């Protein structure tokens, strides 16, 4: 009699095992390369001294310069205005871009939609600080550069989330309104907008909350707000003033987070 051995079950095929080991080898090689690249420009004497330097700066920060608060109200107001007006500017342009990018509302999936998606990707790929650097070089320092930078950054964020909400609407409502003989604008007004309105308000308020945080540092490149005071304090090594600015920024972010949460609870 001839005996046949039972097949042996393997979790992975030989090809999958080979690819798995190649993946691990590539990861190790990338890690070694990155470590060598980091070491080329790292002065380890400074790194070893970093804990002492951090402790020294932390000691100079306390107590914060509470008397410096009076000079921060105007920059704080500028920061809030940059975030608010920038968000409004971004939302104003993001809404039409979102309708052009959504596959169920775009007039052309072959030409218009790719262009709208390109606008969204371009806006999201460049940080607001980079936008501010470019705008300060073009139109000069000031609040206007900060507002436009925040607006340009907000377009991609708002438009992306909004066009995804548009694509997820209930199509039966759209078909019901269209069956009445409504025009394209009326279909958008009565069938699409009511469905995406809660998402729109939630996205807008969430973006405003993010912009409050981002606008606090735009002054580092001359775009107005608290960043200007922070840059001046850092330049003069006034660490207790820096600590006070950090306290104001933290307070502002906490309040904006609370306002954002309350508004989203109310509209969603």
Image (spheres, rainbow, N blue to C red):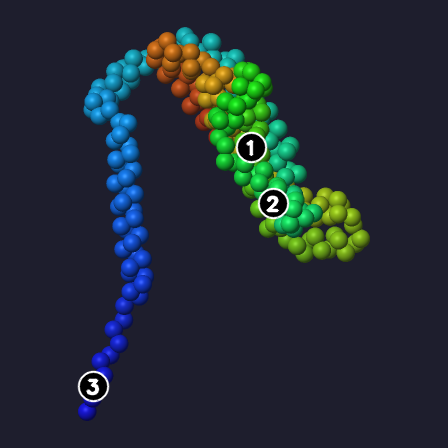
CA gap, disc 1 to disc 3? 71 Å
Q: Position of residue 182 (x, y in %)?
A: 78, 50
Q: What residue is shown with label 2?
A: 114
Q: Please tell me in which quadrant of the rendered image residue 53 appears.
A: top left
**Viewer-side label of 1, 2:** 2
Q: Position of residue 96 (x, y in %)?
A: 66, 38
CA gap, disc 3 to disc 2? 64 Å
Nearer-the-camera pick, 93 or 188:
93
Task: Using the image, determine if residue 133 lies above or below residue 264.
Answer: above
Residue drawn at x 26%, y 35% as measured from the top left: 36
Residue drawn at x 25%, y 15% as measured from the top left: 56
Q: Position of residue 58 (x, y in %)?
A: 29, 17
Nearer-the-camera pick, 238 or 146:
146
Q: What residue is shown with label 3?
A: 3
Task: Using the image, determine if residue 181 lies above or below residue 98.
Answer: below
Q: Are marks 1 and 2 in contact (CB under 8 Å)?
A: no
**First along the sequence among labels 3 and 2:** 3
Q: Is residue 148 left or right of residue 175?
A: left
Badge 3 element: loop
Q: Is residue 263 left or right of residue 37?
A: right
Image quarter in which the N terminus is found: bottom left
Badge 2 element: helix
Q: What residue is shown with label 1?
A: 154
Q: Please tell me in which quadrant of the rendered image residue 248 appears.
A: top left
Q: Are marks 3 and 2 in contact (CB under 8 Å)?
A: no
Q: Is residue 156 left or right of residue 189?
A: left
Badge 1 element: helix
CA gap, disc 1 to disc 2? 19 Å
Q: Is residue 15 visible?
A: yes
């Amino acid at each position: 009699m001839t005996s046949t051995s039972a097949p042996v079950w393997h979790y992975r095929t030989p090809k999958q095992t080979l690819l798995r080991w190649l993946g691990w080898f590539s990861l190790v090689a990338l890690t070694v390369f990155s470590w060598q690249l980091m070491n080329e420009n790292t002065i380890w004497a400074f790194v070893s001294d970093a804990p002492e330097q951090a402790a020294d700066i932390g000691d100079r920060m306390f107590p914060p310069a509470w008397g410096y608060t009076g000079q921060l109200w105007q920059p704080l107001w500028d920061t809030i205005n940059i975030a608010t007006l920038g968000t409004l500017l971004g939302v104003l342009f993001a809404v039409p871009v979102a309708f052009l990018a959504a596959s169920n509302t775009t007039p052309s999936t072959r030409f218009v939609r790719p262009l709208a998606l390109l606008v969204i990707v371009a806006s999201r790929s460049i940080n607001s600080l980079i936008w501010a650097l470019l705008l300060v070089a073009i139109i000069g320092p000031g609040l206007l550069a900060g507002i436009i930078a925040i607006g340009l950054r907000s377009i991609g964020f708002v438009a992306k989330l909004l066009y995804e909400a548009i694509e997820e609407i209930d199509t039966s409502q759209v078909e019901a309104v269209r069956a009445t003989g409504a025009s394209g604008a009326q279909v958008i007004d009565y069938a699409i907008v009511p469905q995406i309105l809660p998402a729109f308000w939630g996205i807008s308020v969430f973006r405003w909350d993010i912009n409050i945080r981002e606008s606090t540092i735009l002054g580092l490149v001359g775009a107005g707000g608290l960043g200007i005071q922070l840059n001046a304090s850092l330049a003069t090594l006034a660490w207790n003033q820096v600590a006070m600015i950090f306290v104001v920024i933290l307070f502002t972010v906490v309040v904006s987070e609370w306002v954002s949460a309350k508004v989203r609870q109310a509209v969603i």
